[in-house]
Image: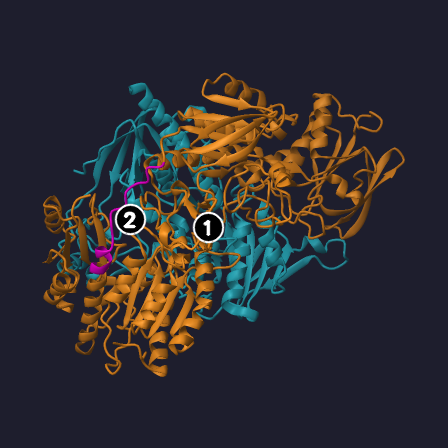
Chain colours: A orange, B cyan
Amino acid sequence: MSVKKVGAYICKGCGLGERLNIKALENIATREGKTAYAKSHDFLCSQAGVDLIKADIAEGTNFLVIGACSRRAKTEAFNFEGVNMSRVNLREGVIWVRPNTPEAKETTQEMAEDYVRMGCAELKHMNFAAPSTEQSLVKHVLVVGGGITGMTAALEAVTAGYQASIVEKSEQLGGVAKQLYKRISLKAPFKAIDNGVSELKAKLESNPNVKIYLNSTISQTNGAPGRFSVDIDQNGTIVTETFGAIIQATGFTPFDMNKLPELGAGKSPDVVDQMGLEMLATAANGGAIKRPSDGKEVKSVLFVQCAGQRSQQEGHLSYCSGHCCLTSIKQATYFKDHNPNADTVVLFTDLRTPGAGGENFYRSGQEKGVTFTKGVAKSVAPNGSGLKVTFDDLILNQVVEQDFDLIVLATGMIPTSGVDIDKVEETTPPEQLKALSILNLNYRQGRDMPQLVHGFVDSHFICFPYETRRTGIYAAGPVRRPMDIAQAQEDATGAALKAIQAIENAALGRAAHPRSGDLSFPKFRKEGCTQCKRCTVECPFGAINEDENRYPVFNEARCRRCGTCMGACPVRVISFENYSIETVGQQIKAVNIPDEYSEKPRLLVLACENDAYPALDMAGMNRLEYSAYVRIIPVRCLGSVNTIWLTDALNSGYDGVMLMGCQKGVDYQCHFVRGSEMAHYRMSKIDDTLKQLNLEGERVATYEIAITDVQKVPQLINEMAETVQRIGMSPFKF
Amino acid sequence: MTEVVATNQTIVVVGGGISGMTAALEAAECGKQVILLEKNPSLGGRVSQLYKYFPKLCFPTCGMEINLRRIKANRNLKVFTMAEVSGVSGQSGDYTLDVTLSPRYVNENCTACGKCSEAVSSEFPNEFNYGLNQRKGAYLPFNMAYPQRYVIDPKLIGTPDADKAKAACPTNAIDLEMTDQKIQLKAGAIIWATGWQPFDAAKIQPYGYGRIPNVITSVEFERMADRMGPTGGKLLRADGKEAKDIAFIQCAGSRDNNYLKHCSRICCMATLKQTTFVREKLGENGKATVYYIDIRAIDRFEDFYQKVQADKNVSFIKSKVANITLDKETNSPILNGNNLEQSGTGQDMRYANRHDLVVLAVGMQPSIDFSKFGLKINEEGFIDADSSNGGMFGAGCASDALDVNRAVQNATASALRAVQIINQVAGAEG
């Protein structure tokens, strides 16, 4: 890499020239910040301003201090390839949050000067992020599970020009879908159609880019996106293959209806679940569906919705499985298509057939004469050759008894998600875990994907359904969340996109969402490491393994660049080239701390760059004022905040420190999962430091801030300023 | 003339809401060249107008900030705002789009300093807040607007305000001579992510929207709840008093042969979410009543339904409200109908319930007529997934009534379908 040459640019536009002493800022950049030069411009983001910078870049400047607006503004203008940049926020962060009065002028200028010092200090300690070289382009996707979701994912990946291998534990492809007599069609005339498995299978089997491993499981997965090395165990023979990305499409198993004896399960062969009815329909093949007990044609059938689901009862499923209302309507039409006079009743509490097609399908059931009754089944008991059902009719408000030939229990889906890594007992034998596990990841944090809720391997984020805590591994279909076939196939297609994207990113050494394209990754100084394992435990993405000597082993393509490891490290041996203990720590130290008697306290804010920092920015855009004594530093995630920064700040005379991160807890909003939580935890330990320094606990505070807290952030800053005024200045000013 | 480089290996995404942004980003992050067209002055779509998401009750702008950062960082992706497609010709792997760029009257010199807005006095209904308040004639659509660039309302042109705005601009960013620009774009594949529009509540005559005060729509309620919204986050009646007893009418215009036949999927969950706003704002004083046919809290959303059901201040009445009348004394709406769950009890099923405010959970319908672009659509006007559409794909609510999570899932799948076409074109061309 070429020699570091830092150039500083101060913009005079947007009122900066009138409000600030620009010459003084230039002097600070060159004299204190040691930049090669400092230039000002009337309108830096204009073509002329940008051309000025570009000309300097052509002359060898490769680090830019841009003293203008926020890093969130004018990103098209200040968009230079091959340079590092520090955007010194003089507009939203200084003049827009300060009154334009003669009294405020001095403190506003001091604010701007400190920010220029901080920008210079950041760049001084920043290096170029070079892409990781650990990957290569491996255009091969591993699909775990050969049901309709996995088959679809594989086909979509090969259609896009990639290779796919399917690992299926049973002796055939097709999964649950193969056992369906027909599948739902949400298009007029709403007649159930072929389950589609044979067609998909034929396409896959004839495609040279598809490999199918039947009777196979995964005994071991090593590596990272772009270089997953997977041991496939096929009837005891191990094949090792390299994949770029993995799709987990392991589907579900139906809830065991024998847990519902009150609904007649196990008491009569004429009580079946939805899969059982598919078998009867397949046997009938369009003819009369016969009941299992005596082979008599079924003339009356009751579908009991939400059987063992949407229930808080022990052993039941609390969630809704999403597809069962549609499935029961489809199954009722199996009877109606053969015999329009068959009595088909769907007993439901809420009929859930959403969307355009769903409601039309419901209506088509009504038109075909299916009866829908709002009620809850109480009991099912054999009655002569039939079954007597007792249910609460919720519309008529009475208990109704009725006889049926056959009962179908619409039971729920249980995801096949392997080992719940958050609940593994240390005493469980590894062999048992290995057999239970799906992916058998050789990851420090467990063998399978972390589960979200009810065993589903879903994303926690509404905007990002494919967000996963294991980079390059994507769940699709009913293992992700309950869904029907149509949605599962859609989901498989989306997951195939993400897998392909992971492959392309890994090949270039780029980060995946949310820091998409980031080329930096953690560097680690082994000599200083004390093998404390905090980084390997706390990484939200399971990116760090441990070697036999308990040193961390970083897997760069798994890393999402949040810096939680850097925040965790007590001996500060982990850093990124462009984001490190020093790039932030030196900014903290660069601030000019006036003496104890100046009545000018200093408050440090470390703000999450995705939520708190934009909220502060928008406070500026709305010209909401806050204290001139605050100095704000955006951080990648509160999880990356190392306590040394706080200790240094307090030691060097800051009067208050504020940490602004995202909401934590069950509905956490941290996009690096636990960053905010880790920060809160670490800060709970800062009390000892404060005691040692004989400082008041109120001087350090951690907040949960949302991006919408535009009015709240200035208030919090002002409250901290008041607190400092009340308890007095820090005695640590030198 | 705007210079655009687009080839038959470019993916054009029409619509810059969350589905369009997602489809564009997912494809661009696979290394494809993508052009994103948005007809409004800024990206974000309807999601940016929501106060919170269900079921996590987090803020949509948080995810939007991430997506905007991805867009700003991606050199494969180019965004055009105020851009509308007027025609499409060609076939899969080789399309030509006719695009009209409407004048913003503000060029890229704009620094969003806000001087133009200070200089003008004329005001217009604020579309971001569904007309619940006014905005200036020179304006930034909302705090998170991207591009972060002001807009001059076309109605300002030719008035003295336009000249005042121009004179106030310190960066010479205002160009009052701008006119419509027509451009042509090549594309290998097109993703239609044009989103949805709320069903026009005024068409539901018996509910008196626009005629009876204190009857509003769910999208308006969402703006009211927003702290940065037109009421500063207060749930207000037309008379400016706080509404404490709030009714929600489900399927307002949906699942109804007279209006939209389909179920719009999101409204049940949106209402459940909005009952939590009532409690958030008013605490113990807030009361919500939901009039419903079925509560469609599908899959894991059931957890959220159970949480709301456990709230004693939220009640549920199984009933399709027949009509709304006005209580002249209090100016409050009265809901009339039959409570289905009281049939058979011997009690009178009929009710006439007065509430402070009524929120109509209005349905979703496609925002444009796709058939004029040769797309196969279904009965409801959504884009059909059909091979006759060639290299054109629906994404998000252009393809069905979807919640955000499903819309994004769907948009990701559409991105792959477009990538498949591009890779085939690239393969054929070597």
- Residue found at x 16% / y 38%: B1
Q: Residue B95 vs residue A493: left or right?
A: left
Image location of residue A229, percent across then percent down: 46, 32
Quarter of the image for the C terminus of chain A: give it.
bottom left
Q: Main secondary structure of the magenta part?
A: loop
Closest to the observer: B229 or A195? A195
Name which residue type carries label 1.
Answer: Thr
**Residue extending furthest toward the top:** A206
Image location of residue B188, percent across then percent down: 32, 27
Residue A516 colored magenta? Answer: no
The kind of secondary structure element at disc 1 is helix
Image location of residue A590, percent across then percent down: 23, 66
> Dot 1 falls on which chain?
A
**Residue extending furthest toward the right:** A384
In front: label 2 or label 1: 1
Which stretch is magenta? A120-134
> Dot 2 falls on which chain?
B
Viewer can see residue A187: no
The kind of secondary structure element at disc 2 is loop
Name which residue type carries label 2.
Answer: Pro
Cα–Cα gap, marks 2 and 1: 46 Å
Residue on which the image places disc 2: B41
Closest to the observer: B247 or A683? A683
Q: Residue B416 vs residue A617: left or right?
A: right
Residue on which the image places disc 1: A536
- Residue found at x 28% / y 57%: A583
